[in-house]
Amino acid sequence: MTGNVQTYTHFLRRDPLYATEKPYSLRLTPPTGFPRTNIKLEKRDIKIRNIRGSGPKPSFDEDGCSLLDLWTEMQHADFDDEEKIKEIYLKEVANCLKTFLGAQHVQIFEHTVRKRHDIFPISTGQPYQYNQPTSIAHVDTTLSWALAMARQLNPDRIEKILKHRVQCVNFWKPLSGPIKDWPLALCSPRTVKPERDFEPCDLVYPDYVVENRQVYHSADYDWFYVSDQRPHEAWVFLQSDTETETKPVMHTSFPLAGADSPISPRESIEARALVYYGGFDDNQTGQQSSAV
């Protein structure tokens, strides 16, 4: 498939409520009478460019994202094994990021396997066995939350760390492919105005809180994706950065019309990592952590 795709995704709806009440979503059973969320969404049509074979690919330095090759030692069935993910795959990702970004140290603090249920986005009314694609435009973290995570993981060396650049990135790849079902779309940070477009939001889990950024719609956005993304093709994209002139890359998944039938439901894995450019001993290598 080439050219542009006409589709839709969801954005945070502008509402006076957020001037006095921070958006939130409870990922737990709330007390009786307490709303699970105060997030109000709107569905908007968007146009997404297919960058497969259409000129230069995005550059991490210039565009906050890049498409990398990662040939994992993992087999498809291995991604159902948490221990193998931690012992093999996350180490591969950490070392890949360390080399690609020229970082001194990498810590992966979270990973998520997603396998689309046959009837998604229609709800089953029951908990899913796996996480589902996210059809809401968002950024995974705020800078303050990412630095708080860095402090939690490295309490004894955080002052040294903060003398250097710190980034939070997402590393996303299919488990099978080529992807023709709910692929990932990214938005060029060149077309984003954070003060206009982003709203901090709390995702409240039973034992921790993630502060991410919800996104308001704008006609300025330049969305793109890579068609038929294969399991060895991984997106790495910026989510937070102490270099304040950079902007995060918002993203979403989207329904892709006109694909060949039958379509295999999308399967993917993403890892969120803190990337450090100083503050660690020179002989330390990339690693993964299970902080949350």
Image (spheres, helix red, strand yellow):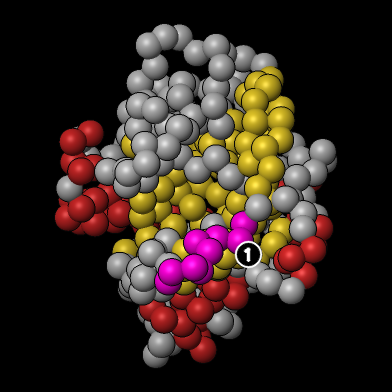
| Nearer-the-camera pick, 93 or 128 | 128
Magenta span dominant secondary structure? loop
**In the image, what residue occupies the spot 74% across and 65% down?**
17
Q: Please report the residue visible at 35 percent of the width from the left and 27 percent of the height from the top.
A: 118
**Left-right relation of 225 to 79:** right
> What is the residue that sits farthest to the top in this orientation?
261
The N terminus - image quarter: top right
Q: Position of residue 101 (x, y in %)?
A: 51, 56
Image vertical order of residue 242 relative to residue 197, above or below: below
Compared across the picture, whether 232 is left or right of 182 comes to left
Viewer-proximal residue among 39 and 2: 39
Residue 32 falls inside the magenta stretch: yes
Q: Position of residue 273 (x, y in %)?
A: 44, 61
- Magenta stretch: give its range: 31-39
Q: Where is residue 208 in the image (x, y as percent from the top left)?
A: 41, 73
* SS at badge 1: loop
Q: Which amino acid does label 1 sit on?
A: Pro
Total marks in image: 1
Asked if one can make out residue 259 in the rendered structure from this viewpoint, the answer is yes
- Residue 251 visible, this orientation: no
User: Residue 49, image x and y in percent?
Assistant: 68, 26
Dot 1 alpha-carbon crowd within 10 angstroms: few under 14, some 14 to 19, many 20 or more: many
Q: Seen in the image, is 142 located left or right of residue 262?
A: right
Q: In which quadrant of the rendered view does residue 10 lie?
A: top right
Q: Is residue 146 magenta?
A: no
Mark 1 highlights which residue?
23
Task: Note whether 213 is above or below 172 in the view shown.
Answer: below
Report the residue at 55% width, 11% height from top. Answer: 258
**Which of the 4 image quadrants contains residue 281?**
bottom left
Residue visible at 39% across and 16% down?
263
The quarter of the picture where residue 132 lies is top left
Q: In which quarter of the image is the C terminus?
A: bottom left
